[in-house]
Image: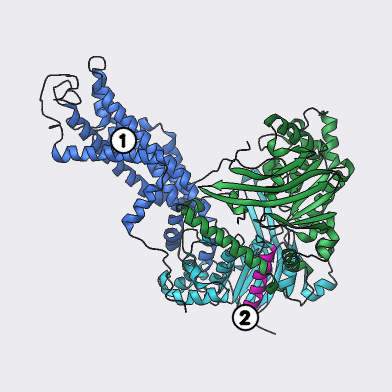
Chain colours: A blue, B green, C cyan
Amino acid sequence: MTAVIRLEGRRRGVLRRSWDYLASFDGLAKTAMWTLAVLFTAALLGRLFGLGGSPTAIVGPRLAAPSLAYPAGTDSLGRSLLPRLLEGVMTTLLLSAVAVLLTAVIATLCGIIAGYRGGRTGGVIMRVGDILYAFPAIVLAILVAAVVGPGYIAALCSIVLVTVPLMTRMVGQATRLVAQRDFITSAVISGVSTPVIMTRHVLRNISGTIAVQGTYALSVAILVEGGLSFLGYGVQLPGSSLGLLVQEGTLYMVKAPWLILLPGIILVIAILAINLIGDSLRDRFEPREARSLE
Amino acid sequence: MSAILDIQDVTVEYSTGGTIVRALDGASLAVRAGETVGLVGESGSGKSTLGSLVGRLLPGNASYPEGRVLVDGHDVLQLGVKELRTLRREQLGFIPQDPISALDPTMRIGRQLELALRGLPNDRAALVGHLERVRMREPERVLRLFPHEISGGMAQRIVIAMTMARSPRILIADEPTAALDSNVRSEVTKLVFGLARDAGTTVLWLSHDLRSVGRWCERVAVMYAGRVVEDGPAEQVLGSPTHPYTVALAAADPAGVQPGERIETSSVDVATLAESFRDDERAAKRRAKTRKTDAESADDPEPAPEEEVVAR
Amino acid sequence: MSETILELDRVTTVFRTGWGRGRSELVAMREVSLDVRAGETLGLVGESGSGKSTTASVALGLREPTSGTVRFLGEPIGGPKQRRARRGLIQTVPQNPHWSLDPRMPVGLSVAEPLAALDGSRLTAHAERVAELLRQVRLDPALAARFPHELSGGQRQRIAIARALVTNPRFIVFDEAVSALDVSVQAQILNLIIDLQAQHGFGALFISHDLAAVRYLAHRIAVMRLGEIVELADTARFYETPEHEYSRQLLEAL
């Protein structure tokens, strides 16, 4: 009578499903995703094919306004700004993404343990998080840079230290909610081991929170990287990052405003786009329907 | 005869995520002044929608393509915002299911009562008087408490005091005792009907429990799939129900079963019908909607409107 | 007389909260004694705060009592460490149909989970047994591939019952398992529990604040109030001559 009953649910191609998933977002979030994709592709192409020339070569007059030869103008040393911008975007995005991935792993681990175990272990994890959270982000970042020495690693560590506490806290709260659910109790009574419960039930049910918080952490990361490089503790010359470019630009704000405007605008756009995606994800995972009474 | 509340063939639809769900499908109910009417229905029958509709208190995604709701001759669905507010304030009273969430958690009980009584005498003595009217012990002390410091039963009494202070013409009570323990339940019910009788208030009592409604209300109306399917004096509806749904509902109640007897669920086809019905609706929604699987995992204390609703 | 499955012997459970001067104690269970035999349902009635939920978690071995002993099949039930030894023998059907199943898993996998925990196999390895169980709770086996939000409350609770039965347990706790359901659906689930018990012979503790449902289903009824059992009697006797004043009140409220 009944043929084979498939327990896995409906399976479709991974690509098809991810595309459907992306297509299900609202217009604003889609625009934001396209913007990020364009930024990233441009940066990638720039790095791969040397779009706009070498980022370090001195090619023309100093502080030349944007023109056909130098689409984004030149900087104080006569280097073309466009390749430097592309390199900066790449550095900033990659650095932030790697840092946020690290954050996600650490925060998910700590958060699940703290939220599920509760008790003393959970308390200690949460308090350490609180203490870190109480430090102003930039002070924390400078502290790290002072210890590790300025550079990529310092930027990476600072971003992780700044974003981990909040995310741990959110993951911990989400876990605590899930852990109270009846299906967890049923699993415990059935003798399912704790690690299996954590991965099979808890992790799946908090994946939304992780995605949302990860996205917000990414925008914070870009901001922290910018601030750190701006202060000179992050990416060092001759490298390039959006924060570093903004810092350079401030020196010639009046004479060559494009030097600060272009990286600044890109920074703002990137953060805005990421926050929009985060909002959209949050609406999807944590709908708080506002009920209006006309 | 003059009906103080006259609901004529009302249709209410909710639009959620591109689909339209019909919550009321030509529901009609006329209530005379001073009557006590029990409106019985299970989840999805549309009774809460009907109750809220009397004060036009539906969420923003609701629309009313057909029908009229007359309160004392005024068509509620056509009133302007100002008239509507006056009507709500002076004619209608609502008692919600969850009394604690009806109170402002940041305000002492006394202050909330004071605000609720604006325009009426609201000095200390009057407040105490209102609390004594709902048989509150130690009213002076209660006035100084915050909502989280009182029990569900006390909170419900306070909400009742606030609502009945204005002697509304029509009182709509949406399962006001469902969240209370059974010993408090009968006290609170007695209180509401007593106060309503004294004030000459018409009562529309929403409940899923056919039996308890029969005990308190003169008249019982049974709702199913967005319509009033049976309506009549309580003894008649309970004693000799005519609609198959009412029959099934009465038979399914374990309290009416003698020891050793078995509930005949084979006759409760309606329940299975209702389930498959909701099932179809879910399937339809799934097809229409882009998958919204993830919204389900979120912590949603209030059921979304679509959960409450049955469509055609 | 049939075998005693679960026995609570003068069990007291005290909750302590706060410290220093703010420290307070709450006695959730006071000298509670009861037993559940094979093939029998013991109904436990009480209002919120009467201690019946605490009794449930003690009976499930989730909480160790402050004093007194809990015996399962004649052996002390012990702490969480012994839980692995008796896994599959005790199950529960929880209260809220909305949270009784993992919203992220096809319900068939939820039903398979206790089996997989028994022998460490994969969740997907038990499709046949899952289909059999779904038929037993009178659901179409094809529903196994659905997610909880695609089912009605009654269907979800049937799935939860299927999951509880899948390991052939000796003892099942129904913790307000029908309270959130509509009356018409509730009647079907109650009948289903009665039929399944006749078929499988498990002992059951049926906890509810609704005396009508308990009376319909249970062989014996225990009335709990403020942490104490005030009356424990056969259902028939309880109908006729409830002894405690509080039991009479409950009956009259019906």
Q: Which residues are magenta?
A: C183-196
- Identified at 38% across, 48% down, the residue is A23
User: Going by the image, does C52 lie left or right of C113?
Assistant: right
Spot occupied by residue B143 in the image (x, y as percentages of width and height):
77, 36
Is residue C177 within the magenta segment? no
Left or right: A147 with respect to C22? left
* Magenta-colored segment: predominant secondary structure: helix
Q: Nearer the viewer, mark 1 or mark 2?
A: 2
Residue C212: where, in percent of width, then height? Answer: 75, 66
Which kind of residue does numbered mark 1 sit on?
Val
Please tell me whether mark 2 sits on a helix, a strand or a loop.
loop
B302 in relation to C137, above or below: above
Identify the mark at residue C201; answer none if there is no mark: 2
Q: Is residue A62 visible?
A: yes
Q: In the image as oriented, which residue stretches furthest toward the right?
A: B198
Q: Dot 1, crowdedness within 10 Å: few (<14), some or many (≥20)? A: many
Query: What kind of residue is marked 2?
Result: Gly
* Residue at the extreme bottom: C1
Q: Which residue is mark 1?
A: A144
Question: Residue C214, relative to residue B36: is it above or below?
Answer: below
Tags 1 and 2 touching, CB below 8 Å? no
Numbered tag placed on residue B221 in the rendering: none
In the image, B123 versus B175, the foreground residue is B175
